[in-house]
Image: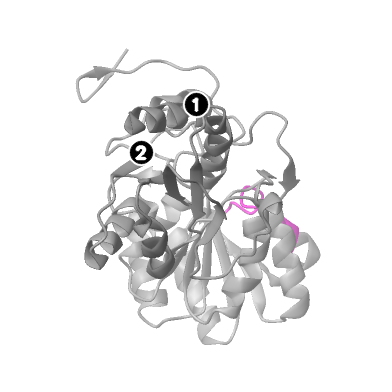
Amino acid sequence: MSSNNGKPKLKTSAMIASIASEGQATRSAPFGHALVELAKQKSNVIGMTADLGKYTDLHILAQAFPERYYQMGMAEQLLMGAAAGFAHEGAQPFVTTYAVFATRRAYDFMHQTIAEDNLDVKIVCALPGLTTGYGPSHQAAEDLALMRAMPNMTVIDPCDAVDIEQMVPAISAHAGPVYARLLRGNVPVVLDEYDYKFELGKAKLLRDGADVLVISSGIMTMRALEVAKALEKDRVGVAVLHVPTIKPLDTETIVREARRSGRLVVVAENHTVIGGLGEAVATALMQAGVHPPFRQVALPDLFLDAGALPTLHDRYGISTQVMAANIKGWLV
C-alpha cells in the first residue's frame, strides 16, 4: 500500500463502471447523434478529434459525414491549431478529446489560437472530473477551473443525455468558443422527468424544498436528485438547482434561490473544491451580500486514487449515499 499525503491508499478492483444507477434508463451516444442532426442542417459543421473518435462518440458523425470528419492523430496541440484555422475559413469545428488532454496538454493552443480571436470552435471533452478510475493521468478534476479562467470561453457541464442533446444545437447557435464536458457511451437519462429545457447561461430549479438548496452541475445534479428522493423519507425537503452553464454563471437565479431564508446551501460538483462551481457560487453570494449556511460536495485538492468508480465516489464523497449522509449531518 502506498500513501497519499501520509494516508494509506486502499486498493480497489475493477477500473471502470457506469455512472448510471442500477436500472436507470440510458441513451446511446447522445452527443454523436445530436451532432449528426446538426450537421444535416448546417453544412459548415465538422468534427475533429485526436485519435479518440470512438471514445467521444464522434464516430457517429464520421459514419454519416466521412468527408466532414478529421482524424488528427495523438497531437492535441495540432488539433486545436487546425480547428482555429478551419474556423477562420468559416467552418464550425466540434473538437473532441479527453478533458485532461485538452485542458492540460493543449491549453496554450486553445488560449492563443481559439479564445484570443474569439473563434467559433466547440471543444467537447470526455472523462470529466471523476468519471474514470484510471487515476490522475485521465481524471480531469481541475478542468472547469482552468477553462473558467480563459477569456471569451463559455463553459458547460451537462447532467445527462437530455442535457447533451439539447446543448449541441444551443452551443452551435452561440458565436464563439465553448468548452463542454461530455458524457459518452450509454448516458443516463434523468432530466426528462422535470420538464427541462437547456438554455445557455441559465440555471433551472428542478425541484423545490424547504430545508436544503443543492446547487449542482454535471452528474452531481443526477446525484442531488437521488439524494432529494432519499431524504424525503426523513422529511427533509431538498431543492435542486441545476447549473449546466458554469460560465457565464446565472448569478441572478442562484442569488434569488439562496436568499430564501432557512435553507442550507450545498454546492455539488464533480470537480476539485478549487476554482469550480463552488467558488463561483460563493463569490456570487458574497458580492450580493447573501450569507446562508454554506457547504461543498466536491473532490479534494489531491491527486486522486485509481480504482473502481463506486469505491472512488464513496471515498471522495460524491456518491448518493455519502452525499445524503453528509447533508443530514450538516442539518443537525
User: Is residue 214 in view?
Assistant: yes
Q: Where is residue 306 in the image (x, y as percent from the top left)?
A: 42, 27
Q: Where is residue 303 in the image (x, y as percent from the top left)?
A: 31, 35
What residue is rendered at 54% in x and 38% in y?
Answer: 228
Q: Which residue ends up furthest to the top in the rendered image?
A: 1
Any mark on residue 321, and which? 1
Q: Is residue 28 left or right of residue 274?
A: right
What residue is rendered at 37% in x and 46% in y?
Answer: 263
Q: Is residue 36 left or right of residue 92?
A: right
Question: Distance of mark 2 from mark 1, alpha carbons?
Answer: 16 Å
- What is the three-letter code of the residue carrying label 2? Leu
Residue range highlighted in magenta: 51-61
Residue 41 position (above or below residue 319): below
Residue tagged 2:
299
Q: Position of residue 233 (x, y in %)?
A: 57, 28
Q: What element carries label 1?
A: helix
Q: Main secondary structure of the magenta part?
A: loop
Residue 46 position (above or below residue 231): below
Q: Which residue ends up furthest to the left in the rendered image?
A: 6
Residue 153 position (above or below residue 305): below
- What is the three-letter code of the residue carrying label 1? Gln
Instruction: Name the quadrant containing residue 283.
Output: bottom left
**Label 2 packing within 10 angstroms: few (<14), some (14-19), many (20+):** many
Q: Is residue 126 left or right of residue 54?
A: left
Of the pair 15 and 300, the residue shown nearer to us: 300
Among the two numbered marks 2 and 1 on one chain, the one whose residue lies closer to the N terminus: 2
Of the pair 222 and 186, the residue shown nearer to us: 222
**Would you say residue 246 sits in the magenta stretch?**
no
Instruction: Name the quadrant containing residue 148.
Output: bottom left
What residue is rendered at 46% in x and 80% in y?
Answer: 119
Q: Is mark 2 on a helix, strand or loop?
A: strand
Circle 2 or circle 1, nearest the eye: 1
